[in-house]
Image (cartoon, rainbow, N blue to C red):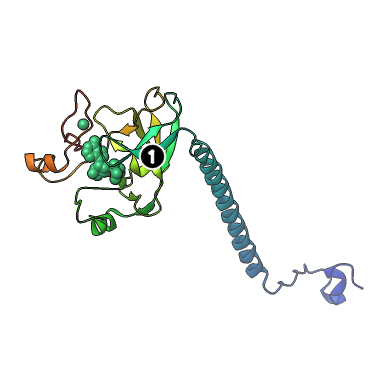
Amino acid sequence: MPKTLRDAVPSDKKNTPVKAPKKPGKSADKKGDKKALKRAEAEAKALRKAEKHAKRQAKLDALVVPGKFIKARKSKVHGLGVFAVAPIAEGQHLIEYIGERISWKEALRRHPHDPAQPNHTFYFSLDNGDCIDANVGGNDARWINHSCAPNCEADEQHGRVFIKALRNITKGEELFYNYGLIIDDKYTKKLKAEYACWCGAPKCRGTMLAPKK
Ligand SMILES: C[S@@+](CC[C@H](N)C(=O)[O-])C[C@H]1O[C@@H](n2cnc3c(N)ncnc32)[C@H](O)[C@@H]1O
Ligand SMILES: [Zn+2]
């Protein structure tokens, strides 16, 4: 058995350097290795991203304890409302605003969900321009009414919306956040009246429409 390539060649050629024969497919192997490495790197990156996402979602899930602080029942302001069933501390996250996530285009197509109440909405606009339609798969958050002097606010975190106490809230108080509704049309008296606010706050603006900037 020749130990080296040189041993394997005929004696008259022994002093000439012998090149190792080209392994068939060696460069193809190299290319394949590179591709496999790239794929492995991409998979590891995707895994890290998924882990980060899952961790973040778990953190957000833990923000609210379902049913601990609030309950929906009849409101003096409008229809159903949501009330504190225990004292709530400022900063507490109370419930997530959930429902089907749809584009604004789809939201316009679906509106109004009830032709008898053309200005009634279960929509929540997201920072990315999409919308949560709480009419589909919504929870009690969809019953929270608007106030011009709210005790809660909507807190959007990574595309998820949580209703959070703006101040300490006593047991029995109704929860409100400022809807901040914005409509492209000119704010005529008629339009403002269509979105009339009945929150009863001393400084009620008379409309749920947010002032235009
Ligand atoms: C997400 S729903 C809130 C639940 C509502 N109370 C119900 O029973 O369907 C939003 C709608 O409630 C009504 N609403 C909420 N806050 C109001 C307020 N301060 N004044 C008048 N109507 C209000 C408006 O019709 C609004 O489009
Ligand atoms: Zn008001």
Q: Which x, y percent locates residue 17?
A: 77, 67
In the displayed structure image, the side of residue 43 where residue 89 appears, left or right: left
Q: Which x, y percent locates residue 117?
A: 20, 51
Whether residue 48 is situated above or below residue 32 in the rendered picture:
above
**Quadrant of the rendered image containing residue 160:** top left
Q: For numbered disc 1, what is the local secondary structure? A: strand
The answer to whether residue 87 is seen in the rendering is yes
Whether residue 133 is situated above or below residue 195 in the rendered picture:
below
In the displayed structure image, the side of residue 66 where residue 5 appears, left or right: right
Q: Residue at x 64, y 62 (%)?
A: 33
Q: How many marks?
A: 1
Along the viewing direction, whichever of 200 and 163 lies nearer the viewer: 200
Along the viewing direction, whichever of 1 and 19 lies nearer the viewer: 1
Whether residue 208 is situated above or below residue 16 in the rendered picture:
above
**Quadrant of the rendered image containing residue 153:** top left
Q: Residue at x 24, y 55 (%)?
A: 114
Q: Which x, y percent locates residue 27?
A: 64, 68
- Report the quarter where the N terminus lies: bottom right
Give the amino acid at mark 1.
Ala
Residue sitting farthest toward the right? 1
In the displayed structure image, the side of residue 123 where residue 138 appears, left or right: right
The answer to whether residue 180 is seen in the rendering is no
Along the viewing direction, whichever of 5 and 42 lies nearer the viewer: 42
- Report the quarter where the C terminus lies: top left
Residue sitting farthest toward the left? 189
Residue indicated by mark 1: 72
Q: Which x, y percent locates residue 169?
A: 39, 24
Q: Residue at x 82, y 74 (%)?
A: 13
Q: Quadrant of ligand 2?
A: top left
| Local crowd size for mark 1, using a 10 Å CA cut-off: few (<14), some (14–19), many (≥20) | some
In the displayed structure image, the side of residue 173 where residue 7 appears, left or right: right
